[in-house]
Image: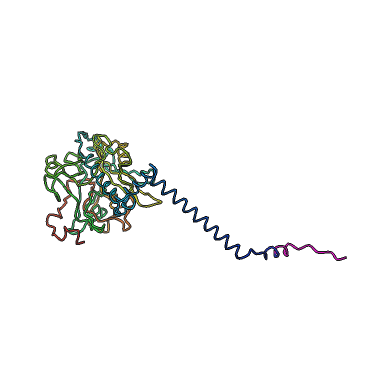
Amino acid sequence: MNESKPLSPRNSAHTSATIKLPKKSRTQRFIRGLLFMLSSFLFVITLFIAWIFMTTSGHHFRYLVADTLISSQHRIWAKYVIGDEALKSRVNDYQNIAVATGSEKATHEIKLTENVSNPTQAKPVEIKEISGKGYKGHIVYVRDPKSLRLVVPDKAGKGEKVSSMVKRTGALLGVNAGGFADPNWKGNGFVPIGLVISNGEIFFDSSGRNKPAQIVGIDKTGKMIAGNYSPNELLKLDIKEAVTFQPRLIVNGKGQLKNEAQGWGIAPRTAMGQKADGTILFVIVDGRQPGHSIGTNLYEIQQILLSEGAVIAANLDGGSSTVLVEGNGSNNSDESEEIDPRIVNKPASQHGERYLPTAFLVFEQPEAITIPNIWAHATKEQLDPSRW
């Protein structure tokens, strides 16, 4: 009797492997899968468009994106998010906010602590790391406000990196200060915006002695001044160091921005404040670097400064200009003994530090520092940003 032999596992596997779907069936399955993915994608896009244009949260998101673009070199792109007319209105709103925050008269008083007159009791400069939702940065504490000087480049025709200013002058620390003319974001950092005052002397004034401008600075007693002032008013107030920038964030211990909607978008930030004991505060936040820090808005900067006890505070130039440099307090002429300053933060510019017209520097002996006015004899070509 013939007995049939069972298929071996090997033969069974071979048999099943040889079973193939018809070519037409496989093509249909592929097309159905592709259509499903496409329809799912379109469904998600439709939901996203409905959310961003038809809900309150979507409206806030669109304006957050627009505000972030407005504070960057890609401002023109904001019109594709909120429209051209809304962009013009938004920029105008920000200007109105800046004017409003600069209108209240500052009545705060500064009482310097014993730590200032006796520096052995506290470090003249301290740096602390900070972080929050989506950002990383630093707070700088300058115990003696009189140790601040506004430093400018030493050569006409081009700005200077803050690290170079710190090394050249032997400063303890440096932070970027005012803005500058930057047509098509190709500026060389030489021509400031508005007003520059160093050691009580007006170095640069693009508007006139009687026209008010938003300024940030410090007077001869060490008291921080920020707000809307004309150059002549500032001279009467014995202003010593100042630049033009805005908006003011804190006046008489009160925050001026009501909420994050007034925060001018997400960006790298630099801000300056002062406590009632005279301590100067600099807040430096990195940005535009996913994985490290995307930045923050000015409302959050305001809240940080309020939590530190600031009674007055104002925004300084930010974005790609934001930089914090730590020096060694020595301008030794022997290059073999020089130690390069350390860039503490991570600047947003893809080219590293930017060339800038002004920086606030901290010195052990500020009265010994001579700052020449490089704009006094600058040529028309050097002062024309369109030629860069």
Q: Nearer the viewer, residue 265 or 245?
A: 265
Residue 346 is one of the magenta-drawn residues: no
In this picture, residue 3 sits left or right of residue 91 = right
Asked if residue 341 is positioned above or below residue 142 in the image, the reply reads below
In this picture, residue 257 sits left or right of residue 41 = left
Asked if residue 276 is positioned above or below residue 173 in the image, the reply reads above
Colouring: rainbow
Q: Quadrant of residue 29?
A: bottom right
Secondary structure of the magenta portion, mostly? Answer: loop
In this picture, residue 385 sits left or right of residue 122 = left
Query: Measured from the top left, where is residue 181 in percent x and y?
Result: 21, 54
Viewport quadrant of the C terminus: bottom left
Query: Measured from the top left, where is residue 258 in percent x and y?
Result: 30, 37
Residue 36 seen in the current view: yes
Residue situated furthest right in the rendering: 1
Which residue is rendered at x = 57% and y = 63% of the image?
27
> Magenta segment, which residues?
1-13
The image shows a total of numbered marks equal to 0
Q: Nearer the viewer, residue 355 or 57?
A: 57
Viewport quadrant of the N terminus: bottom right
Residue 334 seen in the current view: no
Query: Measured from the top left, where is residue 284 in percent x and y?
Result: 31, 46
In this picture, residue 377 sits left or right of residue 274 = left
Query: Measured from the top left, where is residue 263 in percent x and y?
Result: 31, 43
Residue 9 is one of the magenta-drawn residues: yes
